[in-house]
Amino acid sequence: MPPTDKQRILKDATALFGRKAIADGLNVSEAMLDSWNSGDGTIPDGLLLRLADLLVKLAAKRPA
């Protein structure tokens, strides 16, 4: 089954900033993040909004 849009966004975020940064920023375990990335679990809509905020914060910290 192809990945969902939420799963693709989460995978891209993890690839850009790393599992630990994304899991810590969402206040979830890395195992939970892995479950969402693999499609075994589904990221709740509320956490998707938190992910968007987190990505803005992490991107602002990256050197240009």
Image (cartoon, rainbow, N blue to C red):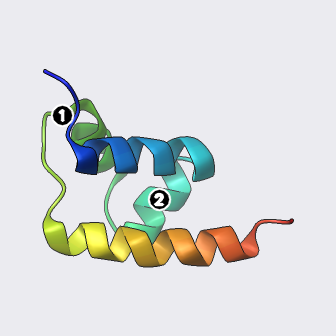
Give neighbour class at mark 1: few <14, some 14-19, many 20+ (Cα, 10 Å). Answer: some
Residue 62 vertical placement versus 29 (above, below): below
Rendered image: mark on residue 17: none
Above or below: residue 62 compared with residue 56? above
Choose the circle earlier in sequence order: 2 or 1.
2
x and y, in percent, of residue 9 in the image: 37, 50
The number of discs equals: 2
In the picture as drawn, the residue positioned furthest to the right comes out as 64
Quadrant hosting residue 31: top left
Quarter of the picture holding the N terminus: top left
| Mark 2 neighbour density, 10 Å: few (under 14) some (14–19) many (20 or more) | many
Amino acid residing under circle 1: Gly
Decide which of 29, 49 is in the foreground and name it: 49
Percent coordinates x, y for residue 12 in the rendering: 47, 44
Is 54 displayed left or right of 50 in the figure?
Answer: right
Residue 22: image tag? 2
CB atoms at circles 2 and 1 under 8 Å apart? no
Q: What kind of residue is marked 2?
A: Ile
Residue drawn at 19 percent across, 75 percent down? 46
The residue shown at (31%, 62%) is: 28
Is residue 27 shown above or below 39?
below
Give the x, y percent position of residue 16.
60, 47
- In-image side of 40 versus 50 (left or right): left
**Helix, strand or loop status at disc 1:** loop
Callout 2 secondary element:
helix
Give the residue at mark 1.
Answer: 39
Cα distance in 3D space between marks 2 and 1: 17 Å
**Relative horizontal placement of residue 28, taking residue 44 as reference (left or right):** right
Q: Position of residue 34 (x, y in %)?
A: 31, 39
Indicate the quadrant where residue 64 lies. bottom right
